[in-house]
Amino acid sequence: MKRIFCILLAGSIWSLSDIPLPTNTPAIAQTQENSDLFYLYKGQRIPLNQRQDAIAVAFKKVGATRDRGAQPLYLQLQQALQGGVRGTTPPKVSPLGEKYALVSLPTGVRDVGGAFQQRIQQQPYVQTTLPVLSRSQRQEIIVLPNEIIISFAPQLDESQRQTILQQNNLAIVRPLRFNRDRYLVKSTSATGTKILSIANQLNEVKGVASAAPNFIQSLTDENLPTATKQIANLKNSQQFYSLTGNITPQSSRSISPKTNLLGLAWQLDSLPLKQCLQQPVSSLESLQSCLQQPIPTKSAVSRTDIHVTDAWKHSNGGRGVVVAVIDSLIQWDHPDLANSLYTVKAADKCPGEVHGWDFSPGGDSANPCENGDADTRISPSELAILGSKFQDTFQLSDAKLVEKYPQEALSVQRKHPDDSLSEIANVVRSFIRNKVGREFHGTYVSGSIAAKPQNGEGLVGVAPNAQILPVRIFGLNGSFTPSAYIEALGYAADRGADIINLSLGASLPTQGEEEEISDILKAHPKLVIVAAAGNENSNQVGFPAAYPGVVAVGATNILGNRAPYSNYGKGLDVVAPGGDLHTPELLGGIPATGGTWLDAFWQGLPNPTSRWSSVVDPRGKYWWVQGTSFSSPEVAGVVALMKGENSKLNREGLVSILKSTASYEGLNISEEDAKLYRSKSVKSDSAKDKQYFFGNGLVNADAAVRAVKQRR
């Protein structure tokens, strides 16, 4: 989740090249504990804290945003708050999609939040301010608007529903599209944190199946410590910069589809790269040379991949199978994705709806086609926002960069007080570049499933002949609402998806979300939903992977260990490679299709001559990534291979085969996990050590495809 730090400004300053930085003072994540702040999930209280170091802002409607030439509203607000309260640094304003923004407040001045809130509300384009919450012990962003998702019992008629709404001072904003009996409503008598109480009370009303606030959440997990670690990692990996030549192992030359970067994709076949990593590999040339060598017949190296290249030899690559990717920016004009797109054929298509739908703008129009957008790619306004930040990292001097991004610089200096200005600026650069790159998370995920390179140059997905249905729910900074997510689920099922991939681990659970997933699975017995287990290194699988009927996928690294971030424990079904950018350096990550290759990011900039982030090539057409977000789409791709060979099997049959053909071969429990297992009281009677960390084991595409073919 996104980490927001409050910085206490000291009286004295530390100056580097005339750029003031504070002395090393502790960061305080201010929250206000209140026993009345909670929401209900299946009758259980989920406690919440109100954050005092942040205010959320809802902007007034400005019409269509994709062609808007004006300065983004969040930047207008940032300028309006400059020098607002004497003795403080200006607050940082970050966009949460296009309708909302987050104002991170400075501390050290009495009632600083009230002072800035007054200035915010004076701006003519601001509709209202909203409270910011977090769960206990988590530094996350949960914004509470005046919106509640309510599900009525199906037997209620319209008059009964209206009676419930009137008695509780509620008005319908709009019915949720592709849903029955589910509405977005707002209170006509309350605002702020009182919305929690109203939602909780509704759960006690006869005729209401469930009710929950329509929280605006942020799932962005890039942080400054990650950027700090990456600096050293990039230095160690410079010798492999610009891997655009032929990285095809000799053993894979007869494999179709052909791709020049297959040697990097160890998740598909790990033997070539692992064999080379057993030897001294000091440069790109030596790596290429090693990959051209034949693999010994009796190699001592164990496989830690999911046997995809073997499965291709006797499968059609998932032809005819549609995989919906519900995620962030899906740049489907990427050369490796352009030939893998599904074309919507529904009779009730909205104007312009060809390749999926973008639910992230949301809206409250009675016309459902106005509550979203037909294009899941980056919009001109989004490109202007991200492009400006991206170019700053290349064009601004160390001093100017620190001056323009003071909060990020202050956080780095606080954690590393002995760092020079140059070292601090480099961490800030890495942080910004990573955040821009990760806005294309949906593009990463889509390529993992069905990338199909043109002319044999690029990356290939697990099921290259499957088709992707792009469905966007995330705005900038990983922001989304449950209403958009619930509608996206219904949309994917309605538009004919055979598989839905949800790389959304650790989101807040809501009963409405679980009900929607349950309804979809009942209505579509052949549909398979695959989800990421989460990246909190927790013994609890995150949501939505933890919901009944969803395939929960954990992550492993190239050594066959549990990836150090991956969730585990009860509810984990299977694992697949998720990568580890530190084992061994970037080559241990998963290569994925990226979005920073767009010309707009590089306008006026020369092609870089050294690695500037976790990129495979100079402009970032391909990135190295890690996370259960990428083990999940690999499993979705395996299911696509299975369905491509046998479309008659229902979900139960497919998932049963997926689990039964998985194994612990090549998997190892690290010394740290072994200690962890011994220290915990694992109460499940059947949970053995490997089962605890790997579920039913590492997926095997080859074995799974063979098994479904036998069921014809």
Image: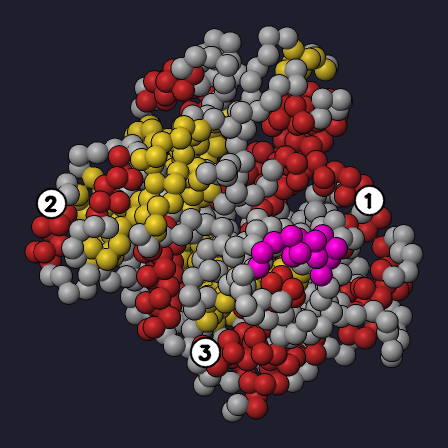
Question: What residue would you read off at disc 2?
Answer: 166
Amino acid beneath label 2: Gln
Among numbered discs 2 and 3, the one appearing first in the sequence: 2
Question: What residue would you read off at disc 1?
Answer: 236
User: Magenta segment, which residues?
Assistant: 669-682
- Left or right: 252 in relation to 682: right
Disc 2 and disc 1 in contact, CB within 8 angstroms: no
What's the magenta bit mostly, secondary-structure-wise? helix
Amino acid beneath label 3: Glu
**Residue depicted at x 42% and y 77%:** 526
- Left or right: 298 in relation to 199: right
Q: Position of residue 705 (x, y in %)?
A: 60, 82
**Residue depicted at x 43% and y 43%:** 217
**Residue depicted at x 8% and y 56%:** 159
Among numbered discs 2 and 1, the one appearing first in the sequence: 2
**Residue depicted at x 47% and y 8%:** 86
**Camera sees residue 338:** no
Q: Position of residue 643 (x, y in %)?
A: 51, 79
Question: What residue would you read off at disc 3?
Answer: 652
State the residue lying farthest toward the right: 280
Number of residues whose C-alpha sits closer than 10 Å to that of mark 2, classed few (under 14), some (14–19) or many (20 or more): few
